[in-house]
Image (tube, rainbow, N blue to C red):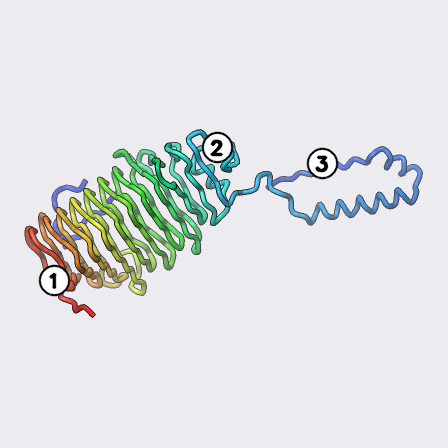
Amino acid sequence: MGRDVRPWLIRIGPALAMRSSLSPVCFPPHATRALRQPSGGFVKFIAVFAVGLALVGVLPFAPAQAQNQHSFVSSVGNDANNCTLAAPCRHLQAALTATISGGEIAILDTAGYNGGTTVTITQAVSIVNPGGFEAAIAPPSGGTGIVINVGTNDAVSLRGLSIDGAGVGATGIQFNSGASLTIENCIVRHMNGDGINFFSTTATSALTISNSLMADNGSNGVLLEPTGSATAVFNRVEANNNALYGIFVDGVSSAGTNTINVTVSESVAAGNGQAGFNSQTGSGNAPTNFTIFHSVAANNGIGVAAGGSGATLRLANSTVTGSTAFGWGAFSSGVVYSYGDNYIDGNAGNSGSLTPIAKQ
């Protein structure tokens, strides 16, 4: 669920093995005869048999079913299949089990692909809907659609997914660990908590979101709150009608030796209850640097905000309008910079100073 706003921020209305077993050794009939009547041939047989037994102890056993570089899921698939194109699986979790680290899972047609349970990703993987149909994920009641717990050097990519919480799912996507998460052409909406949580515990991690919508969620569209350093890029992203923030960058869980750098371009944050774009941290925590270029903050409680010592927000060639409280808000030593080429108009007011910054 979403966090309460910090004391400096005016609340705008209520927020919503194989086992292998070895078979017993049986000698062929001619060998038993040879036991009674030793011969040169029998000696050779014994030598060959002994070598064979030695090899059994040192050679690896082949797995019952090899994993795929490319796996597939389909509305007519079966999770007992091997997830190949000729025999696709039905759900993503089965396909993840059948896919090697660094592999790809392709979605073949319109259907729901999580079977009412959380999809848990534990290896580097790309999940791809090539387009032309809907690949739906329905988070369980009070649960999360996709949880990502991968290794320090692992990258995860999600493309073309529609994650709808139907008002009962808590979170759409939650990233807990890994090198990077890339989200493209996805929709995350109707959660009763956050659309996307980036809670990375990895020392350095990256988030990239493009051509995607986070809307109508009960807390934030996107909450970026790592415990280490992080970078994030949002391009052609919409974060609309979320109860708290559209895109919220928070450094309070990260040490002051880290940094969090975020860039937004060609994007919209509209109709969010608290703020469209928000940069926040505190003394002793990671500084948060939030740059917004050629984007729109419209009809939010606050258009753009920076709160706390070390929080900055830079605004370039962007529009801020229709804010019911403030167009910009610079709170508790947070700084909002402007390159002097923005369109800030039609807001109820502003809080703090808008600090000019020269173009180079």
Provide the residue designation for mark 1.
Answer: 354
Callout in the foreground (2, 3): 2
**On the rendered structure, is 72 left or right of 291?**
right
Provide the residue designation for mark 2.
Answer: 79
Q: Quadrant of the N terminus?
A: top left
How many angstroms separate mark 3 from mark 1 (CA)?
79 Å
How many angstroms separate mark 2 from mark 3 (CA)?
31 Å
Q: Quadrant of the C terminus?
A: bottom left
Q: Nearer the viewer, residue 309 or 123?
A: 123
Q: Are marks 1 and 2 in contact (CB under 8 Å)?
A: no
Q: x and y percent of residue 122 in the render? A: 44, 46
SS of the residue at dot 2?
Answer: loop
Q: Earlier in the sequence, mark 2 or mark 3?
A: 3
Looking at the image, which residue is at 47% across and 47% down?
103
Q: x and y percent of residue 41 in the render? A: 89, 43
- Disc 3 residue type (three-letter): Ser
Q: x and y percent of residue 161 in the render? A: 34, 40
- Most extreme residue toward the top is 76
SS of the residue at dot 1?
Answer: strand
User: Badge 3 local density, few (<14 within 10 Å), some, or many (20+)?
Assistant: few
**On the rendered structure, is 171 left or right of 6?**
right
Q: Nearer the viewer, residue 5 or 215?
A: 215
- Disc 2 residue type (three-letter): Asp
Q: Nearer the viewer, residue 349 or 133?
A: 133
User: Badge 1 local density, few (<14 within 10 Å), some, or many (20+)?
Assistant: some
Viewer can see residue 24: yes
- Disc 1 residue type (three-letter): Leu
Provide the residue designation for mark 3.
Answer: 23
Callout in the foreground (3, 1): 1
**On the rendered structure, is 201 left or right of 341?**
right
Looking at the image, which residue is at 16% across and 44% down?
271
